[in-house]
Amino acid sequence: QVQLTVSGGGLVQTGGSLRLSCAASGRTFLSYVMGWFRQAPGKEREFVAALRWSGDSTYYADSVKGRFTISRDNAKNTVYLQMNSLKAEDTAVYYCGAGLIFNQYVANGRAYNYWGQGTQVTVSS
């Protein structure tokens, strides 16, 4: 049974940092794309960042480029989202997803097969 366990959310002030973790289990993810999405109140879920378990490809939304970094620890089967210089508009529930996805679809949440539970990130000004 595939399971994505998300942790690391919380409350932080503007300009602060948080690191989210997504621990994957239940299958081999070497061919998968792992992605982070977020959903703010009253808004649709939006793409944040993604990477492939194999290789060096990473993908970012324009709104987080230069501030967020996605990375992985193969030994721990865990994907991270390091979030720096946080802004109030980063406040949202953050989700981790996994899927067998072509590059052109990594920002499309519908392409993901598995999702973890969300974690709340609140940035106070």
Image: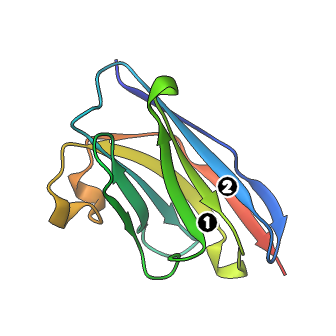
| Quadrant for the N terminus in the image | top left
| Quadrant for the C terminus in the image | bottom right
Q: Nearer the viewer, residue 11 or 54?
A: 54
Picture residue at 81% right of the left edge, 77% below the top:
14
Mark carried by residue 120: 2
Q: Earlier in the sequence, mark 1 or mark 2?
A: 1
Left or right, residue 118 beside residue 45? right
Number of residues whose C-alpha sits closer than 10 Å to that of mark 1, classed few (under 14), some (14–19) or many (20 or more):
many
- The count of marks equals 2
Say which amino acid is labelled 2.
Gln
Residue 58 appears in which quarter of the rendering? bottom left
Left or right, residue 80 beside residue 111? right
Picture residue at 48% right of the left edge, 24% below the top:
75
> Mark 1 and 2 residues: CB-CB less than 8 Å, in contact?
yes
Mark carried by residue 92: 1
Q: Is residue 70 above or below residue 13?
A: above
Q: Is residue 62 above or below residue 58?
A: below
Residue 11 appears in which quarter of the rendering? bottom right
Query: Residue 51: where, in percent of width, then height?
Result: 36, 53
Q: Is residue 101 above or below residue 54?
A: below
